[in-house]
Image (spheres, rainbow, N blue to C red):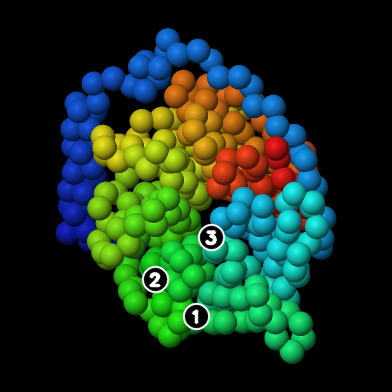
């Protein structure tokens, strides 16, 4: 039988819930109109007509993560087959295959410069590889193995070639100095696993999404969040900074995608698929921010018009759940990877 609730805990829980409700009411008062109402007279955006231009085959197990380099040409994928593959998405060729010490890779990151990639997962560490240097076996050289996590590594992003930001299952965010291999900061960020990180274009701020159903905005130099966003009813699996820098998009286990705005400090967009049958694992925004794209458990990528909240269509082709999608920095291509062992580049 369940343990008896401590009356003090019950009272505190009620107080917290009342505060949250009060906050939501205050936000509603401040929101004098909705994005959909304001955009109702805009013309409908054209249907997104992109197809799989490159079908990247090479992994022999589920592919869990994909990330583009700053050149919008090369991308890295990490798979449970214990390999990272660096792809040239223009030719579809493999540039490098990097064998991992642990096959349980959950997240990959490509440095903007194209010099380094990083990965991590159930091995509770973040491993950084130098793509321009080889070890005795001819593989990309491991520059750093960053240890000291008490949970799995769920996300990593390079701030530059010498600093990396990581989120993990122990609810923490860490920033590492790669030259000395030491943490420059480490702090409790959420009340549940940190699942996703998205950096702003200038790399000064970032957004995190968590299993605790909230998203937070952070300054790279500070260990307290600037803003916290509520609204999702289940894990926030993915966050993506809006190209304007004024907000971010999310994809969640609660079968919705949403748009949050920093200036109004609240949710302004709510997006649902036509059948609402499965959760979203990843999200991306077009370069203009007019389209929001989400990879789903239903094997499709769903697209909406961000402004009018209209479902714009799906990208079909994957044969199993989509684990990760990534928009090229120049906005010209979308990479997706899936449990079907394949990586697709949509143009």
Q: Is residue 77 left or right of residue 284?
A: right
Q: Residues within 10 Å of mark 1 (few under 14, many from 20)?
A: some
* Secondary structure of the residue carrying numbered label 1: strand
The residue tagged 2 is 174
Which of the two discs, 3 and 2, labels the residue nearer the N terminus? 3
Q: Earlier in the sequence, mark 1 or mark 2?
A: 1
Residue 296 appears in which quarter of the rendering? Answer: top right
Q: Nearer the viewer, mark 3 or mark 2?
A: 3
- Give the image location of residue 161, x and y in percent: 49, 70
Residue pictured at 57% horizontal, 82% vertical: 143
- Give me the residue at 42% from left, 10% from top: 41
Judged from the image, the secondary structure of the residue bearing numbered disc 3 is loop
SS type, badge 2:
strand
- Characterize the local packing of mark 2: few (<14), some (14-19) or many (20 or more) Cα atoms within 10 angstroms: some
Report the residue marked by disc 3: 112
The answer for how far apart the CA atoms under marks 3 and 2 are is 19 Å
Q: Earlier in the sequence, mark 1 or mark 3?
A: 3
- Can you identify the residue that label 1 sits on? 146
- Camera-nearest label, 1 or 3: 3
Image position of 316 with respect to 109: above or below: above
- Residue 179 visible in the current orientation: yes
Question: Marks 1 and 3, Cα distance to the nearest angstrom?
Answer: 20 Å
Q: Residue at x 45, y 13 (%)?
A: 42
- Assess whether mark 2 and mark 1 are in contact (beta carbons under 8 angstroms): yes
> Residue 118 appears in which quarter of the rendering?
bottom right
């Amino acid at each position: 039988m369940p343990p008896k609730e401590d009356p003090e805990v019950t009272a505190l829980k009620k107080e917290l819930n009342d505060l949250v409700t009060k906050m939501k009411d205050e936000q509603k008062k401040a929101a004098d109109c909705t994005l959909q109402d304001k955009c109702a007279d805009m013309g409908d955006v054209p249907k997104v007509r992109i197809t799989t231009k490159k079908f990247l085959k090479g992994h022999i197990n589920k592919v869990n993560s994909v990330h583009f380099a700053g050149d919008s040409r090369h991308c890295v994928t990490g798979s449970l087959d214990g390999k990272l593959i660096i792809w040239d998405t223009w030719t579809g060729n493999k540039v490098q295959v990097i064998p991992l010490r642990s096959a349980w890779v959950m997240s990959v990151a490509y440095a903007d410069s194209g010099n380094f990639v990083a990965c991590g997962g159930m091995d509770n560490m973040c491993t950084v590889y130098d793509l321009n240097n080889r070890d005795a076996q001819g593989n990309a050289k491991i520059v750093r193995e960053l240890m000291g996590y008490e949970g799995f590594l769920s996300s990593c992003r390079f701030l530059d070639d010498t600093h990396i930001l990581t989120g993990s299952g122990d609810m923490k965010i860490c920033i590492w100095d790669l030259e000395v291999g030491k943490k420059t900061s480490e702090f409790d960020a959420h009340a549940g696993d940190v699942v996703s990180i998205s950096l702003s274009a200038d790399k000064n701020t970032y957004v995190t999404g968590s299993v605790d159903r909230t998203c937070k905005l952070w300054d790279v130099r500070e260990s307290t969040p600037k803003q916290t966003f509520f609204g999702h009813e289940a894990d926030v699996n993915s966050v993506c900074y809006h190209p304007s820098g004024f907000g971010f998009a999310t994809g969640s286990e609660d079968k919705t995608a949403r748009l949050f705005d920093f200036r109004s400090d609240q949710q302004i967009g709510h997006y649902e698929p036509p059948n609402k049958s499965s959760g979203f694992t990843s999200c991306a925004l077009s370069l203009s921010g007019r389209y929001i794209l989400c990879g789903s458990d239903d094997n499709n990528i769903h697209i909406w018009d961000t402004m009018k909240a209209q479902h714009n269509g799906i990208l079909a082709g994957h044969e199993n759940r989509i684990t990760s999608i990534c928009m090229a920095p120049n906005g010209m291509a979308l990479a997706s990877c899936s449990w079907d062992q394949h990586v697709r580049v949509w143009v």
